[in-house]
Amino acid sequence: MEKDTVKAANLTDIRAEIDEIDDKLVDLFRKRLEIVERVAANKKDRGAPVYDPVRERAILSKVAKAVGPEHENGACLLFSTLMAISRARQRIVMRGEPELVGAIKSAMATTANIFPTIADVACAGTEGSYAQQATNKLFHYPTIKFVAGFEKVFDAVESGEAPYGVLPVENSAAGTVAQVYDLMVRRDFRIVKALKLKVNHVLLGVRGVRLDEIKEVKSHPQALAQCSKYLKSHPEWRAVADVNTAVAAKELAASGERSVAVIASRACAELYGLDIIGENIQDEHFNYTRFICISKKLEIYPDARKFSVMLSLPHHPGSLAMILSKFAAIGVNITKLESRPIPGMDFEFRFIFDFDASPRDEQVLRLLAELSDDPEIENFTFLGAYAED
């Protein structure tokens, strides 16, 4: 018992020493940032750049030598982070509030209090598609403009033909809708709302058809992937990709082909006079598809609690880790991190971050300011702040 008390007392004393060092570190950190502001003012007067790679390499080399091999990695991580914070502070002093932060504040001030219930909306496919069902849930009374494919949705929004567009971006079973993410890179849009839609797939055939007559099953590639187990249980069937679940159903009804079935929504059975010959055929019972609503105009509604941003990073060790540490430092939860290859660039990737936060959080706005104003981050794009149902 006495020995345990001695150990506890010793630990208390040791922690007191650590607390004393931490207090000194905090004070030194504050003083360093005060000096950084003077450095920024000097650089601004001289027209000098914020980033000085020669000096930063020299500092890291000096630190590594000072602490020795055992502590080299930790010390260099600490000082790399400290210099990244210093660069961000210098940019704010030298350039003022970034344009992005002003745009976000302006959007919050000018956007209506409630998301519209009536609007013209572009979505891929035709009546009975899951995109159409998502559109109805988002807007209640939309005028839907059906277009041929995801790219046409972006076209309609960019041209002003439809102020809003609805697109699927991921499924809980089949994963990312890669085509939509690849289109995001070169299109001008903002995300204004999102929705998770429960998806129940059924197998549809013409009136009176039997399962043993089926030789081919058509649907969108995502729907085929979501029903892979069911399809594998029928190896005699050939799976054929189509542009859209509802389009496939509509074409089947028009053709009357008894050897073909389609995977689509239950609504398509009634819409196109087809029989349901297979119920709930998706691999997972909890099968959800996430849809985003896009607009050319930046709109941020009062209930916005999610952000999406897109960026490219330099191809060197630690670049992604440094970005992730910025989110962790302010307690922001990253809900999705998607990487897509950059065409024509070997082993170069563009990242899309989704994270939970309020656009009224000043810490979050400062983080966005840092990311948007950092010359080491290539092609930073703010995709939107929005609510997700």
Image: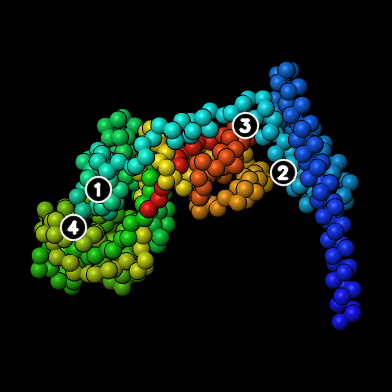
| Discs 3, 1 touching: Cβ within 8 Å | no
Counting from the top left corner in percent of width and height, residue 58 is at 82, 36
What secondary structure is marked by label 2?
helix
**How much space separates mark 3 and mark 1, taking CA atoms?**
43 Å
Disc 3 residue type (three-letter): Pro
Q: Residues within 10 Å of mark 1 (few under 14, many from 20)?
A: some
Counting from the top left corner in percent of width and height, residue 30 is at 77, 39
Counting from the top left corner in percent of width and height, residue 85 is at 70, 39
Q: Nearer the viewer, residue 217 or 371?
A: 371
Work out whether mark 1 precedes mark 2 in sequence or the reverse, and give the earlier one: 2
Work out whether mark 1 precedes mark 4 in sequence or the reverse, and give the earlier one: 1
Disc 2 residue type (three-letter): Thr
Q: Nearer the viewer, mark 1 or mark 2?
A: 1
Q: Considering only vertical position in the picture, is 212 above or below 191?
A: below
Q: How many marks?
A: 4
Work out whether mark 3 precedes mark 2 in sequence or the reverse, and give the earlier one: 2
What secondary structure is marked by label 4?
helix
Choose top left, top right, bottom left or bottom right for residue 163.
Answer: top left
| Discs 3, 4 touching: Cβ within 8 Å | no
What residue is at 88 percent from the left and 63 percent from the top?
Answer: 13
Q: What label does residue 81 carry, if any?
A: 2
What residue is at 70 percent from the left and 25 percent from the top?
Answer: 49
Q: What label does residue 375 carry, if any?
A: 3
What secondary structure is marked by label 3?
loop
What residue is at 52 percent from the left and 47 percent from the top?
Answer: 357
Name the residue beneath numbered marker 1: 140
